């Protein structure tokens, strides 16, 4: 650690001399080329997005001196991917954000062609350090370190880079492909006092989480074996590795011990899905051992079955919880998002923990989002008759939070049979969309709907009877979401591990102009979609609850709120 602090002292001198100042100047020049007036039509009201331009992965979210920090991949020059820097915002509540100048931008040989994704680690004494991928002059992916210049600044405005960068490089000896070596995780400290970090990689078609160890966070040695790898999965982007327990109380990233399970998440470049496995971290061998059946291709477990990628968790030491951030990209064509002048939003931060079954994770929007709830409409218990579509009136349906619970236990006589060959819920949802009548279901919500129902996004359930259990399917059907033919309207779906005979079926949707972020079964399955209505815009948008199944269903409770605008440097 001594060498680390010595380096930090030298760095003050070097940086104050010239390095950062020159880089800042060129950064400002680039910023002046940004397009003047981005389109507001599909901008969100309470999801995080910069005022204009391209945004992708959330980077290194953390909390420091009572302030939350979000860094993110950003193109200061325009609405398409490129010229990537780490943009930076801070917040007291994870909802309202203040923008700062970019924290990390090309200024060294080790990142002259881009500052790609990475993570923050709290070193001893709660000092933050960022490991990130730099793109070097040969366009090789290398791993770099940056630390705050002034630890007494809670805003962490200035970051200085290690003169030892790059700290991890691809070489012919280590057989690392220089175009598949990126996105270091938050590091964790082993019982032997050494830090560990994983970096995403692939060798041929084998996806890998390469493991590195270090005593001082500066000199890193590649371990003989990866933490984990799977043949045939392609490049693993943005890996994440963290401990969980079956309570919403989160664990610090370095926690190990009896009863602690670990999650390995990877963002699969091939499919653009964030998949995860639950298992054990065998720390004496430094390997991840997935639970039986959890490994192969991550057995289909996803954080979100819609649009949600390159996600990252952090341990919120303020509130003792683990929080998940994820990037929701556009469903517009490239041509259309460039014309729009911006691209990409961040999902609402989610609390994440292990389900009591131990088989999957559960997610729920952080409670701070409820401070934006404004006007509430509540409905008493009521029957939703077969074939009915009822408007939920009295709220601003284009920016709303709606939470509804259904009871179907007494309505399962007419339920359709489940065919065991139906293993792909997305395919099943696209074959059995919102307008395909079933025994019990489809029932759920029609959101961002036009008054004439020419446009709507349907988020709904459908129940089937398998041999000795009921199967619940949760779908988000975008096929009618817009009269505009051009956006991608793929239907999404997930199986939901809820027993409808004994449990209510809950659905919460966060609706925000062009985002529908839905949580089924109290967060056991999440589906996020981007939609671009042409009629159901602003005050013209409507919200309906519907039941197109043959059986009636009961709404046991339903509350809906208009959401206030968060202050995120956006339209008001
Ligand atoms: N985005 C970053 C990469 C990462 C990818 C570049 C994932 O570091 O692998 O912007 O979206």
Image (cartoon, helix red, strand yellow):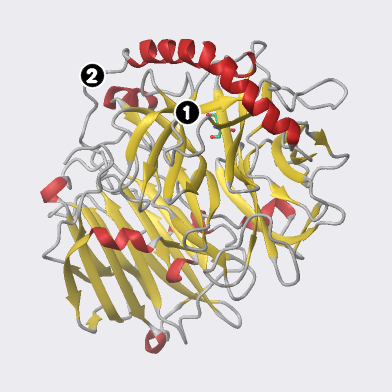
Residue 350's spot in the image, x, y percent?
A: 45, 57
Q: Nearer the viewer, mark 1 or mark 2?
A: 1
Out of 90 and 240, give the one closest to the viewer: 90
Residue count near mark 1 (Cα–Cα under 10 Å), binned few <14, some 14–19, many ≥20: some
Check the image and report above or below for 531 versus 294.
above
Please name the residue shown 44% across and 38% down the image.
153
Which disc, if any, is residue 36? Answer: 2
Residue 441's spot in the image, x, y percent?
A: 37, 72
Check the image and report above or below for 513 versus 392.
above
Tell me if I can see residue 418 in this picture.
yes
Residue count near mark 2 (Cα–Cα under 10 Å), binned few <14, some 14–19, many ≥20: few
Which disc, if any, is residue 332? Answer: none
Tell me if I can see residue 548 in this picture.
no
Residue 5's spot in the image, x, y percent?
A: 68, 32
Q: Quadrant of the N terminus?
A: top right
Please name the residue shown 56% across and 33% down the image.
117
Please name the residue shown 43% across and 70% down the image.
522
Which of the marked residues, 1 or 2, is nearer the chain's N terminus?
2
Out of 514 and 285, give the one closest to the viewer: 285
The CA span between labels 1 and 2 is 27 Å
Ligand 1 lies in quarter? top right
Total marks placed: 2
Label 1: which residue? 158
Please name the residue shown 52% across and 30% down the image.
149
Extreme-bottom residue of the structure: 410
Instruction: Answer with left or right where residue 208 lies relative to residue 30.
Output: right
Q: Quadrant of the C terminus?
A: top left
Check the image and report above or below for 494 versus 398.
below
């Amino acid at each position: 650690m001594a060498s680390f602090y010595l380096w930090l002292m030298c760095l003050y001198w070097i940086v104050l001399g010239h390095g950062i100042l020159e880089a800042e100047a060129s950064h400002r020049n680039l910023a002046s080329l940004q397009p003047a007036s981005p389109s507001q039509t599909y901008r969100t009201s309470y999801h995080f997005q910069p005022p204009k331009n391209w945004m992708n992965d959330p980077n290194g979210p953390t909390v420091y001196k009572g302030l939350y920090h979000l860094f993110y991949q950003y193109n200061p020059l325009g609405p398409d991917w490129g010229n990537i820097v780490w943009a930076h915002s801070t917040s007291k509540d994870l909802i309202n954000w203040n923008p700062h100048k970019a924290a990390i931008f090309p200024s060294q040989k080790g990142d002259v062609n881009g500052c790609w994704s990475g993570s923050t680690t709290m070193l001893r004494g709660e000092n933050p350090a960022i490991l990130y991928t730099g793109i070097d002059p040969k366009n090789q992916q290398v791993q770099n370190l940056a630390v705050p210049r002034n630890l007494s600044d809670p805003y962490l405005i200035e970051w200085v880079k290690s003169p030892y960068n790059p700290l991890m490089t691809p070489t012919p000896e280590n057989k690392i492909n220089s175009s598949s070596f990126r996105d270091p995780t938050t590091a964790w400290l082993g019982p032997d006092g050494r830090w560990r970090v994983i970096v995403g990689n692939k060798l041929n078609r084998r996806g890998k989480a390469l493991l590195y160890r270090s005593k001082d966070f500066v000199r890193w040695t590649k371990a003989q074996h990866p933490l984990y790898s799977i043949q045939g999965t392609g490049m693993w982007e943005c890996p994440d590795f963290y401990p969980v327990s079956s309570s919403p109380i989160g664990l610090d990233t370095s926690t190990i011990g009896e009863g602690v399970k670990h999650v390995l998440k990877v963002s699969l470049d091939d499919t653009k899905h964030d998949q995860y496995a639950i298992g054990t971290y065998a720390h004496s061998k430094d390997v991840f051992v997935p639970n039986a059946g959890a490994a192969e291709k991550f057995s289909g477990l996803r954080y979100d079955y819609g649009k949600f990628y390159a996600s990252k968790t952090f341990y919120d030491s303020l509130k003792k919880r683990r929080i998940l951030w994820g990037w929701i990209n556009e469903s517009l064509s490239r041509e259309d998002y460039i014309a729009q002048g911006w691209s990409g939003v961040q999902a609402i931060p989610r609390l994440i923990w292990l389900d009591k079954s131990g088989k999957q994770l559960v997610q729920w929007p952080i409670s701070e989002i409820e401070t934006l709830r404004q006007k509430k409409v509540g409905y008493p218990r009521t029957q939703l008759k077969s074939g009915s579509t009822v408007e939920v009136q009295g709220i601003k349906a284009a920016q709303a939070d709606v939470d509804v619970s259904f009871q179907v236990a007494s309505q399962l006589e007419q339920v359709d049979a489940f065919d065991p060959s139906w293993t792909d819920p997305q395919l099943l949802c696209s074959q059995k969309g919102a307008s395909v009548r079933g025994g019990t279901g489809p029932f759920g919500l029609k959101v961002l709907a036009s008054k004439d129902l020419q446009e709507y996004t349907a988020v709904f359930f459908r129940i089937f009877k398998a041999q000795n259990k009921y199967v619940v399917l949760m779908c988000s059907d975008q096929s009618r979401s817009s009269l505009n033919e051009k956006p991608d309207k793929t239907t999404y779906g997930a199986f939901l591990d809820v027993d409808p005979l004994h449990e209510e079926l809950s659905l919460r949707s966060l609706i925000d102009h062009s985002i529908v972020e839905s949580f089924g079964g109290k967060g056991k399955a999440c589906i996020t979609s981007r939609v671009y209505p042409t009629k159901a815009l602003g005050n013209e948008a409507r919200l309906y609850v519907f039941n197109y199944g043959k059986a009636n269903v009961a709404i046991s409770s339903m509350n809906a709120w208009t959401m206030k605008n968060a202050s995120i440097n956006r339209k008001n």
